[in-house]
Image (cartoon, grey):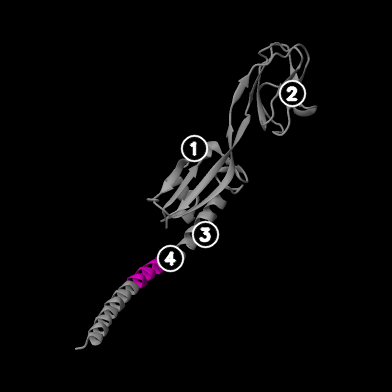
């Protein structure tokens, strides 16, 4: 064999080796690509359903007619405190048989199943907590001013013998009246969007202790509601 033929043979062998390596690398790349594509298609097939469910559940959680709200997009803090996985599934049948987690401002308030991944929907909501305040006002001026954000007031009326409380007004509007005299517990509705001044009409002086008031102011804060579905 001539020197030229030897060189050509060596080059041919080298080219075959390079071609084999290239084919091996191409096969590996195609294999990885198929695995990635398969995972992507599987995820694409799975995520829309999860996302739709998460979005639907979040809509229902903040619906104004739902069990957790006082009005649309305003959650009742007491109802949220009582929420757990069973209550979530009972109140929202769409959850049944699925792995779902509901978080509010970073705290998990209810979950069903084992949520490790899944699709998540986030939305800003308001959380409203109602408080109860009882006070015995000084009635020397025959009027009492209450703060805003209460929608009702209960009056425990107990005037001294011979004194009759006949009328209660809220911002000038008569909300309770009895010519024979109001006694016991009387609940009146007031506007939660304005300051309320209660005025009392009696046939004599009402000393302190004649009326005890219980009202229910609310405190509202902004929070992040996070719903995750791992179907």
Depth check, mark 1 against mark 2: the one in front is 1
Q: Which mark is residue 198?
A: 2
Rendered-image quadrant of the C terminus: bottom left
Residue at the farthest right position: 172
Q: Which residue does the numbered mark 3 point to in the structure image?
A: 52
The residue lying toward the viewer, choosing from 193 and 5, is 5
Above or below, comparing residue 180 to residue 1 in the picture: above
The residue lying toward the viewer, choosing from 210 and 106, is 106
Marks 4 and 2 in Cβ contact (< 8 Å): no
Depth check, mark 4 against mark 2: the one in front is 4
Q: Quadrant of residue 6?
A: bottom left
Q: CA distance from mark 4 to mark 1?
A: 39 Å
Q: Which residue does the numbered mark 4 point to in the structure image?
A: 40
Q: What residue is rendered at 63% in x and 19% in y? A: 135
Earlier residue among tags 2 and 3: 3
Residue 42 is a magenta residue: yes
Q: CA distance from mark 2 to mark 3?
A: 50 Å
The percent position of residue 119, horizontal first and vertical second, equals: 47, 55
Q: Which residue does the numbered mark 1 point to in the structure image?
A: 81
Residue 39 is a magenta residue: yes
């Amino acid at each position: 064999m001539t020197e030229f033929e030897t060189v050509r043979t060596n080059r041919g062998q080298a080219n075959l080796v390079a071609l084999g390596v290239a084919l091996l690398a191409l096969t590996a790349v195609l294999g990885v690509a198929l695995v990635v594509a398969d995972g992507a298609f599987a995820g694409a097939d799975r995520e829309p359903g999860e996302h739709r469910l998460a979005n639907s559940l979040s809509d229902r959680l903040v619906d104004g007619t739902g069990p957790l709200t006082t009005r649309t997009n305003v959650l009742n803090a007491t109802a949220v405190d009582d929420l757990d996985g069973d209550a979530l599934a009972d109140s929202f049948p769409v959850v049944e048989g699925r792995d779902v987690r509901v978080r509010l401002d970073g705290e998990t308030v209810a979950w069903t199943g084992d949520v490790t991944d899944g699709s998540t929907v986030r939305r800003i909501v308001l959380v409203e907590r109602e408080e109860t305040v009882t006070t015995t006002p000084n009635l020397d001026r025959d009027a009492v001013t209450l703060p805003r954000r209460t929608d009702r007031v209960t009056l425990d009326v107990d005037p001294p013998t011979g004194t009759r409380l006949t009328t209660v007004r809220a911002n000038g509007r008569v909300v309770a009246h009895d010519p024979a005299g109001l006694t016991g517990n009387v609940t009146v509705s007031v506007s939660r969007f304005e300051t309320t001044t209660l005025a009392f009409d009696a046939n004599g002086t009402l000393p302190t202790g004649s009326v005890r008031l219980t009202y229910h102011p609310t405190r509202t804060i902004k929070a992040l509601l996070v719903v995750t579905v791992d179907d």
